[in-house]
Image (tube, rainbow, N blue to C red):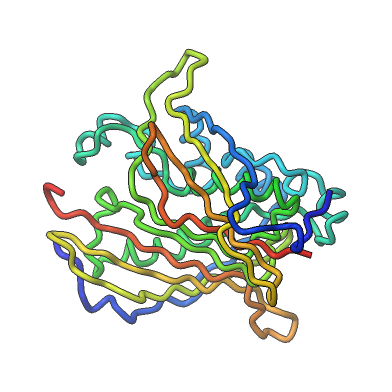
Amino acid sequence: MSLKFEDLAVGQEIGARSIDVTRQDLVKYAGASGDFNPIHWNEAFATGVDLPGVIAHGMFTMGAAVQLVSDWVDDPAAVIDYQTRFTKPVLVADTTGTSEPGAVIEVVGVVGALDADARTARIDLTVTFEGQKVLMKSQAVVKLA
Amino acid sequence: MTINPDLQGRSYPAAEVYDVGREKIREFARAVKATHPAHFDVEAARALGHADLVAPPTFAIIVAQRADAQLIEDPESGIDFSRVVHADQRFTHHRAIVAGDQLRAELHVDGVRAMGGGAMITTRAEIFALRDDLQRDPVATTTSSILVRGEGQ
């Protein structure tokens, strides 16, 4: 399957997915990214700096949300620009030792704009946790053939 | 603790080289729950026209946050890392990052403004490789704003 610019229309949905998140995922992301801020893995530390509990790295949410776009365009390198604002924290409950996720993030992608000269599409991502948007102006620009 | 307003306009030169390895691309891809084969299978990446495994779209954060660390750890900055909240982030890719790249990042402090008892700081990392003739090959530009919360915020 190869996407063609001509086949896209503004408003078209590219897909949706749910992302399960556990405390272990946050430890994994900390290790992979090098961001060891304890607010992402230590409850006492997080509440000690006035947070409601352990929260996901904003960059974990941003990085996981764009996978919908990478898979849809079928080439991660086609994502030439990606931005977001972090508006609400994703609180991740401690479900260690169970098979339950500590949080579930929902992602929906829609074609937000098309640029015929550049042959790019702007994909607008709606990213929510417990019904509230956690990312705002989450936009990925993809270059198409 | 207050944020030093003189930080604005400051830049930190590219200090160290970041060697992009295949296993790091795979590890980071798994950590953001990416499953596209171009992150894991060299042949799949080559089939798409890439020289080697392709990094996920937010991989450059590793290099950018290392550059940011120079600012955060600068004793003159007055930033308490435990009170830092990430406010926004952008990646502009001039080309794909692939395994085998040697990346350098030059950090620029583009904005500092007081907010309540804290401050919003905007930084930009210009990430590049060096060509054989030592000219810069631009790879990515990342911009990031962090909110340093004041006490009780």
Q: Quadrant of the N terminus of chain B?
A: bottom left
Residue beneath the point at 11% across and 47% down = B152
Choose between B103 and A65: the one closer to the eye.
A65
Choose between B64 and B34: the one closer to the eye.
B34
Residue beneath the point at 59% across and 61% down = A122
| Image location of residue B118, percent across then percent down | 18, 60
Choose between A131 and B99: the one closer to the eye.
A131
How many marks the image carries: the answer is 0
**Above or below, comparing residue B146 to residue A134 in the picture:** below
| Image location of residue A50, percent across then percent down | 19, 39
| Image location of residue B41, percent across then percent down | 81, 45
| Image location of residue B47, percent across then percent down | 88, 54
A16 on left or right of B52: left
B78 on left or right of A25: left
B110 on left or right of B149: right
Residue beneath the point at 68% across and 69% down = B95
